[in-house]
């Protein structure tokens, strides 16, 4: 034997170790790129309108009808509510639900000018000062909303332009 030579091969020179090293390297070459590859995130659907509500309240200034009325519109129905009448025995609180068409809902959505509604100044709580108050609320699928308060004789143009479904609401049944 020559000086420095050994009869035993080092562990790094055995056929088993070399084969294992090749297999491990191949597996790393296959798995590492996939670990760093990012799958493109599916873009979330933009929020859509799920409900439109409009109403009127006048505190104690209501006269002989309801002091508060609320109309809630969803894709297939409209709910009208009248509450707080001056005489609850003859005019009790009332809630009426009527169907609307898909076309009614689409016309309503097309008539909403979101940027114009957001640009309107807020007037605060008019009914807190016993002044009549009207409101409009647009609710979205992500929980966000646009709310506008205004005096009933001062309907802002973006609110007046909204095409609410023209349905008959039975009042006395």
Image: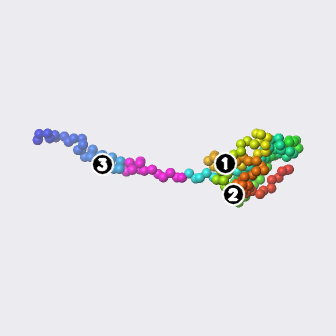
Going by the picture, which residue comes out furthest to the left?
2
Measuring from the top left, give residue 141's x and y in whole percent.
63, 49
Residue 50 placement, left or right of 134: left
Q: Secondary structure at mark 1?
A: strand
Q: Which residue is mark 3?
A: 22
Structure colour scheme: rainbow
Q: To which residue does mark 1 refer?
A: 146
* Cα distance in 3D space between marks 2 and 3: 67 Å
Local crowd at mark 1 within 10 Å, few (<14), some, or many (≥20)?
few
Where is residue 123? Give x, y as percent.
Answer: 71, 45
The residue wearing badge 2 is: 111
Q: Residue placed at 56% from the left, 51% from the top?
A: 44
Sort mark 2 into few (<14), some (14-19) or many (20+) by Cα contacts within 10 Å. some
Q: Is residue 21 visible?
A: yes
Image quadrant containing the N terminus: top left
Q: Quadrant of residue 8?
A: top left
| Residue 39 sits inside the magenta stretch | yes
- The residue positioned 58% from the left and 53% from the top of the image is 45
Which label's residue is closer to the chain start, 2 or 1?
Answer: 2
With respect to residue 7, does 53 lie above or below? below
Q: Is residue 103 magenta?
A: no
Segment tinted magenta in the rendering: 30-43
Secondary element at image label 3 = helix
Give how far across and how far down residue 116 sits, in percent: 66, 53
Q: Nearer the viewer, residue 108 or 57?
A: 57
Q: Earlier in the sequence, mark 2 or mark 3?
A: 3
Q: Earlier in the sequence, mark 1 or mark 3?
A: 3
Residue that appears at 77% across and 57% down: 166
- Number of marks: 3
Q: Nearer the viewer, residue 99 or 7?
A: 99
């Amino acid at each position: 034997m020559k000086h420095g030579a050994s009869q035993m091969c080092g562990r790094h020179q055995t056929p088993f170790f070399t084969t294992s090293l090749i297999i491990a390297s191949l597996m790393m070459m296959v798995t590492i790129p996939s670990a760093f590859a990012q799958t493109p995130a599916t873009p979330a659907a933009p929020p859509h309108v799920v409900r439109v509500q409009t109403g009127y309240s006048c505190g104690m200034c209501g006269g002989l009808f309801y002091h508060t009325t609320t109309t809630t519109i969803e894709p297939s129905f409209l709910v009208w509510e009248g509450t707080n009448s001056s005489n609850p025995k003859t005019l009790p609180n009332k809630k009426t639900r009527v169907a609307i068409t898909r076309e009614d809902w689409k016309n309503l959505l097309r008539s909403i000018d979101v940027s114009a509604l957001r640009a309107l100044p807020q007037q605060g709580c008019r009914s807190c000062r016993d002044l009549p108050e009207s409101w409009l609320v647009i609710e979205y699928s992500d929980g966000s909303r646009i709310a506008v308060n205004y005096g009933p004789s001062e309907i802002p143009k973006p609110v007046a332009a909204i095409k609410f479904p023209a349905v008959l609401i039975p009042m006395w049944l």
